[in-house]
Amino acid sequence: MISVPDYAHLKPGFADPVLDSQSAFRTIMSAIAYPGRIVTIGGSACGPSPLSPATTAFCLTLADGQTPIWLDVSARSAEIPTYLRFHCGAPIVDDPGAAQFAIIVDAAAAPRLHLFDAGEDEYPDRSATMCLQVASLTDGAETRWSGPGIEHAIFPRVTVPDWFWSDWLANAAAYPKGIDVVFTCGDAAIALPRTVKVEA
């Protein structure tokens, strides 16, 4: 007998899918254009725990049937896979290297950056984007960011695993290849494109 997923008790997506996704898209693009700037993208998104509103909005806005998603253990064990398949049509993959988006809700157990697709020399834009849900965007150790979209150096304080910034140096050294990262916390987010130099 074929098992049919139970969608009856799934949390809803955006209250207004068209307007909310358009607004979230503009906000995410603004965050990418201005790295380190804290933006609010939660809106009406309220996905299953432990997805934050900002992480939920990221998925609902950018994921579709052509964007394979890798989920960390904490996200995979909840109803999140069913939620994303239903609302986004996105396939869930087991191999982090096969994902276009990586959704990580437990930053302390996040996989190392080199495990994700950094793109190819001819097609660096086909690399993965990591959506990393963190405890705080303002209470971590101070770092110095510089690069495109940053007029003067800025000093974000995102809470990340101890190894993250050394991995970021290796990721940046592979430019134009390399993954991009969006940090989320609650209904807020900060983008970290591969073009940004970080001194920790």
Image (cartoon, rainbow, N blue to C red):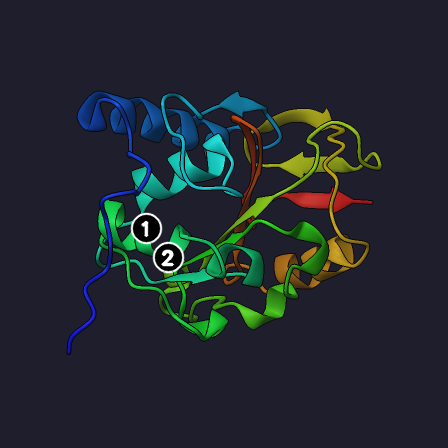
Identify which residue, 123 or 102, lies in the foreground.
102
Identify which residue, 79 or 96, lies in the foreground.
79
Q: Residues within 10 Å of mark 1 (few under 14, many from 20)?
A: many
Quadrant (top left/top right/bottom left/bottom right) for the C terminus: top right
**Residue displayed at 59% across by 25% down:** 37
Label 1 with label 2: CB-CB less than 8 Å: yes
Q: Secondary structure at mark 2?
A: helix
Residue 136 higher or lower than 74, as above or below = above
**Mark 2 sits on what residue?**
81
Residue 45 % position (x, y): 37, 29
User: For the residue marked with disc 2, what is the amino acid?
Assistant: Pro
**Residue displayed at 26% across by 26% down:** 22
Q: Secondary structure at mark 1?
A: helix
Residue 31 % position (x, y): 49, 29
Q: CA distance from mark 1 to mark 2?
A: 5 Å
User: For the residue marked with disc 1, what is the amino acid?
Assistant: Leu
On the picture, is 110 further left or further right than 95?
right
Q: Residues within 10 Å of mark 2 (few under 14, many from 20)?
A: some
**Mark 1 sits on what residue?**
84
On the picture, is 58 further left or further right than 74?
left
Which of the 4 image quarters holds residue 113?
bottom right
Identify which residue, 184 or 86, lies in the foreground.
86
Identify which residue, 82 or 179, lies in the foreground.
82
Residue extending furthest toward the front: 1
Residue 195 higher or lower than 166, as above or below = above
Residue extending furthest toward the left: 1
Which of the 4 image quarters holds residue 1?
bottom left
**Residue displayed at 40% across by 37% down:** 47
